[in-house]
Image: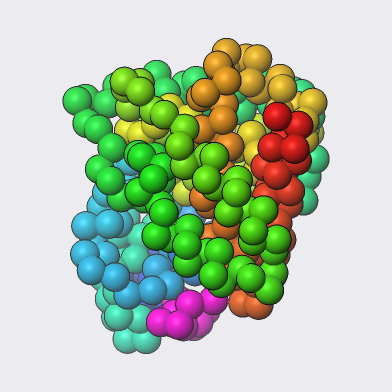
């Protein structure tokens, strides 16, 4: 999926665990169904996952430590299951970076599901619970989504250029010209999960049961977690979510804008290397565009 992607095999994972965490030597190691885009994820027994960053990046250890701190901050703060940090592993033969171990959260990812009103209510409860966390004086750092929409002009231009053969780019440019102007005003930052995509959301019997990839937890635009409305919900349940969160028109539209920013990056980047991920982007984009047609 990535030009600089690292390869890691099951036997390498087995060797790293046996050497660094001998207490888990008897636990089977196996890849789960599905494939991450940021980490290669392996099951370790029935209760743990080992997560190996797929790309070299500066400060990998600090990144993993920040993820663990975010996971600890969220753990137990809502009634929905989230991973708990367990350990950070060291580089070793066959893999050059630090890596992490978390608890395994059971459930079915929402990628191929069609959640209804009950799920929408659960999602609203989760978002409300995350927003209620204390920022402890922190504000958005300027890294990624969640600040000023106009800060994404350059990346959106790249997306438009790379999507010429894939999407109706002139229409999408017009949509972005509207979305980028949405004012933030003096709305203070609140805590957000930051990446409520289908692959990060777990379901059972039509209800939300757990949320994964919580390492991005942090202060940002209150509208950021509304991307989940567009990634996960059709119009009826989406309206339920909006009602339960009591979103005004501007906040709701900014949430749509953040979803647009994310999916425009997904479609061209993963078009040939991870078609299911690109397909998620296309489905969400269709929802975003359909809502614009109804404005």
In the image, 264 versus 131, the foreground residue is 264
Q: Residue at x 47, y 62 (%)?
A: 157
Image x and y of residue 283, in percent: 73, 52
Taking 4 as reference, is 195 left or right?
right
Rendered position, 18 above or below 254: below
- Majority secondary structure of the magenta segment? loop
The answer to whether residue 255 of the structure is visible from this angle is yes
Q: Is residue 259 above or below residue 15?
A: above
Measuring 68% from the left and 74% from the top, which residue is drawn there?
Answer: 165
**Residue 295: quarter of image:** top right
What residue range appears in magenta? 1-14
Residue 135 in percent (x, y) is at: 27, 26
What residue appears at the point 69 percent right and 63 percent down from the top-left corner?
Answer: 167
Q: Is residue 18 left or right of residue 212?
A: left
Which image quarter: residue 274? bottom right
Residue 69's spot in the image, x, y percent? 28, 42
Q: Residue farthest to the bottom? A: 94
Picture colour scheme: rainbow
Q: Please name the residue shown 61% across and 68% down the image.
A: 163
In the image, residue 50 lies in the stretch drawn in magenta: no
Q: Nearer the viewer, residue 10 or 257?
A: 257
């Amino acid at each position: 999926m990535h030009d600089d992607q690292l390869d890691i095999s099951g036997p390498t994972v087995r060797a790293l665990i046996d050497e660094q965490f001998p207490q888990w030597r008897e636990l089977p190691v196996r890849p789960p169904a599905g494939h991450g885009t940021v980490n290669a994820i392996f099951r370790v027994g029935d209760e743990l996952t080992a997560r190996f960053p797929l790309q070299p990046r500066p400060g990998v250890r600090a990144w993993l430590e920040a993820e663990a701190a975010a996971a600890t901050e969220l753990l137990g703060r809502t009634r929905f299951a989230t991973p708990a940090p367990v350990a950070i592993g060291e580089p070793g033969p066959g893999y050059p970076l630090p890596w992490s171990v978390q608890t395994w959260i059971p459930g079915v990812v929402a990628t191929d599901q069609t959640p209804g009103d009950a799920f929408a209510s659960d999602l609203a409860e989760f978002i409300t619970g995350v927003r209620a966390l204390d920022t402890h004086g922190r504000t958005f750092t300027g890294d990624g989504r969640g600040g000023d929409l106009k800060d994404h002009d350059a990346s959106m231009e790249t997306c438009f250029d790379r999507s010429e053969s894939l999407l109706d780019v002139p229409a999408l440019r017009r949509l972005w010209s509207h979305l980028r102007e949405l004012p933030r005003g003096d709305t203070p930052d609140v805590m957000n999960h930051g990446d409520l995509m289908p692959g990060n959301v777990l379901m059972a019997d039509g209800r939300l049961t757990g949320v994964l990839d919580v390492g991005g937890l942090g202060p940002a635009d209150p509208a950021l977690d509304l991307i989940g409305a567009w990634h996960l919900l059709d119009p009826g349940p989406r309206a339920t979510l909006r009602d339960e969160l009591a979103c005004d028109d501007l906040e709701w539209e900014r949430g749509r804008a953040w979803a647009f920013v994310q999916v425009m990056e997904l479609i061209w980047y993963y078009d040939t290397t991870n078609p299911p991920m690109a397909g998620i982007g296309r489905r969400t984009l269709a929802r975003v565009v359909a809502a614009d047609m109804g404005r």
